[in-house]
Amino acid sequence: MPIIAAPVTTPPDPGTSPDAGGGIVIPDYGRATVTYYDPTGKEWPLTTPSLGWKTLADGVSGLGAVPYELTTDAHPRGGARLRHVQAQPRTIVWPLRVYGSTHTEFVGRWRQLAAAFTRTLRPGPDGLPTPGLLEIARPDGSRRRIEVFYQDGFEGLGNNTTGRIVDVAVLSLWCEDPYWADALAVSIHRETGTPVDYLNPYPSVSSSQVLGATTVVNPGDVDVWPVWTITGPATSITFTREDTGDAFTLDMQATSHGALLAGQTVTISTDPPRVRSGTGENLVAGLNWPEAVLWSVPPGETPVVFQLNGAEAGSAVDLTFYPRYETA
């Protein structure tokens, strides 16, 4: 574990600190404002010195490209062939300097921060640990987030000059998903219009089947696994990725729910596979297994088609995903 050695001095006056305006300069990444959200949703700014703690930017690491494990096979004529690439969990090292004007104030802040990070290891409502979120915001308004679990580091430096009114915690934050996600979702909405009379006022076509072909643009660096929300009326829904031919169909009439009526919704999550009605019913049996492929959206442009059988005015499909990136 990296050890950050810092001289013990009187805590800086926030009004004269170079970071008083918020944000830090992270080597190789530029100025950023950093916030940690604990599993309860409470916000902990990490680059606002007036709160009694600040990030030591020179010790930050683990924000770069995702670590990968390469599986290879020896080649008979020498060298090797790459067979498989697997993204690995990442560990972010985040040093925090905590201080107070009195020992009591310092200890109170130290305990609060320790509890906020270690809370990620406590069982949540589903019995599993709930991660926190580390968010890095740039001056251009962009924000990227990553889910983190506390691993270790809240011990302090442990020497005779620390622990009274100042100390440094060098946190190791473990990320099961190593990719950073945009804080803002990309959403695509398609809705069926009001049907028209074929001959009035002139020959025209109004489809009650296909909402149409569209192009989904993923601005991120890696594949994303979208969430689909369907609003009735609809009897069955088919989603096709045209460049690969992958598709899946949800037949509402094959479920205990029956056809979607006007205003009723069903949500399909592609990772993990999950289908829920607006009232929480499990409808995953309505997918056309084993042919169903709950496909991902790769970086760039992807042609897709949404098709709703039994669609009427108000029938709609919403696709939502958060672009994912290699770096912060």
Image: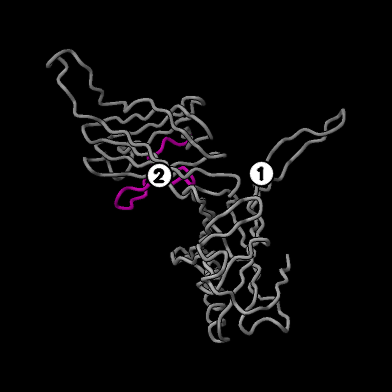
State if disc 1 and disc 2 touch (CB < 8 Å).
Answer: no
Residue closest to the eye, 269 or 116 = 116
* Marker disc for residue 86: 1
Give residue 16's quadrant in the image.
Answer: bottom right
> Can you say whether 161 is above or below 83 in the image?
below
Q: Secondary structure at mark 2?
A: helix
Q: Residue at label 2? A: 284
Residue closest to the eye, 261 or 301 = 301
**Where does the magenta region start and end?**
270-290
Precedes in sequence: disc 2 or disc 1: 1
| Residue 82 included in the magenta stretch of the image | no
- Which residue is drawn at the image coordinates 53% and 81% (left, top)? 108
x and y, in percent, of residue 247 in the image: 45, 30
> Can you say whether 34 is above or below 192 in the image?
below
- Which residue is drawn at the image coordinates 45% and 41% (left, top)? 226
- Which residue is drawn at the image coordinates 39% and 27% (left, top)? 214
Q: CA distance from mark 2 to mark 1?
A: 28 Å
Q: Amino acid at mark 2?
A: Val
x and y, in percent, of residue 66 in the image: 65, 47
Is label 2 or label 1 in front? Answer: 1
